[in-house]
Amino acid sequence: MSVVMNKLQPSQLAEEQRNAARLFKQLHCQLQSKLSLGDLNNNQVDEAMEKVLALDRAYPLPLLGSMIEKLPTNVEPATWWPQRKTMQKPKHKQASTKLGGNGWSRALEDEMREIAGVLKRDQQEYLRLSQKALQINKILAVSGPLLTLLGAFGSVLVGSCSGTWPVILGVVAGSMASIANAMEHGGQVGMVFEMYRSNAGFFKLMEETIETIESNVRRENGEVLEMKVALQLGRSLSELRELAASNSSRRTEEMGEFASKLF
């Protein structure tokens, strides 16, 4: 039972499905908004289908043969969106002619570039934390069943071997197994790992969104993009601009302020 529990990681499984339910609900609301506006085309339908399939691949239904690996070898950010095609950034001269329109300016372009840098830094920090949580979870996942087996082995040998070492082995190993299992499942280590991994994916998505819009000849209004980024990070526009300014002035390896105020 201990091996099965450590293989399934119930707390991590619950966090995965909670994130999946939230993202599916968010996607459902986006599709409803587009349907209410009408005037859909085939490209929008294909884009919506790609988003649904990507989300289904990122968070498959558990226990159906496609369950996410709970103790992976390498830690990667959670990716629940379709991979965008790489696009060539426009040349500087061509980009400069577009800065005056569509809500874009040179200052806003620099601000978005600094925000993308902060998001990348935060993504790396959350990956570092998720790597630590994964290492702790692996140690506990192996230690729990192994100590339980040693405790059972010591209990079997009680009375059949001379000396008190079987009793000591059974008591000590059983107690340590209880501690390891309590720390792993009571401490929700798997849930913490999945939370950090999802946060890293959130920052990766925002970073890719900003870079894609910048490289696509300003497809979205710059002021609208700035407002959306501020809302997603739980900041006001003034706070977002202060974050970009503080990051541009910090050129050392010292850890600065996190981008998001939500998590």
Image: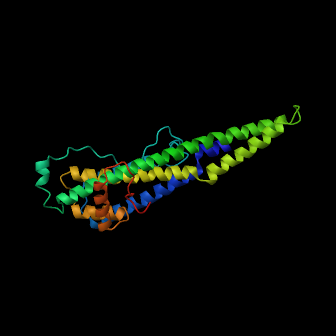
Q: Quadrant of the N terminus?
A: top right
Whether residue 224 appears in this view of the structure is yes
The residue sitting at 75% across, 43% down in the picture is 174
If the image is split into quadrants, where does the C terminus sit?
bottom left
Residue at left 32%, top 63%?
230
The residue lying toward the viewer, choosing from 209 and 21, is: 209
State the residue in front, 81 or 60.
Answer: 81
Q: Colour scheme of this structure image? A: rainbow
Image coordinates for residue 188, horizontal then vertical, percent = 59, 53
Residue 112: horizontal and vertical position, in percent? Answer: 26, 56
Tell me if 199 is positioned left or right of 220 in this view. Answer: right
Count of picture labels: 0
**Apparent side of residue 75 relative to residue 113 in the rendered image (left or right):** right
Question: Can residue 56 be seen by looking at this rendering?
Answer: no
Q: Against 194, is 38 above or below?
A: below
Give the image location of residue 133, x and y in percent: 53, 47
What residue is drawn where x is 57% and y is 50%? Answer: 189
Q: Residue at x 37, y 50 (%)?
A: 121
Residue extending farthest to the top is 161
- Please state the horizontal and vertical placement of residue 67, each as a whole percent of the image: 52, 44
43 relative to 13 in the view: left or right: left
Q: Quadrant of residue 243?
A: bottom left
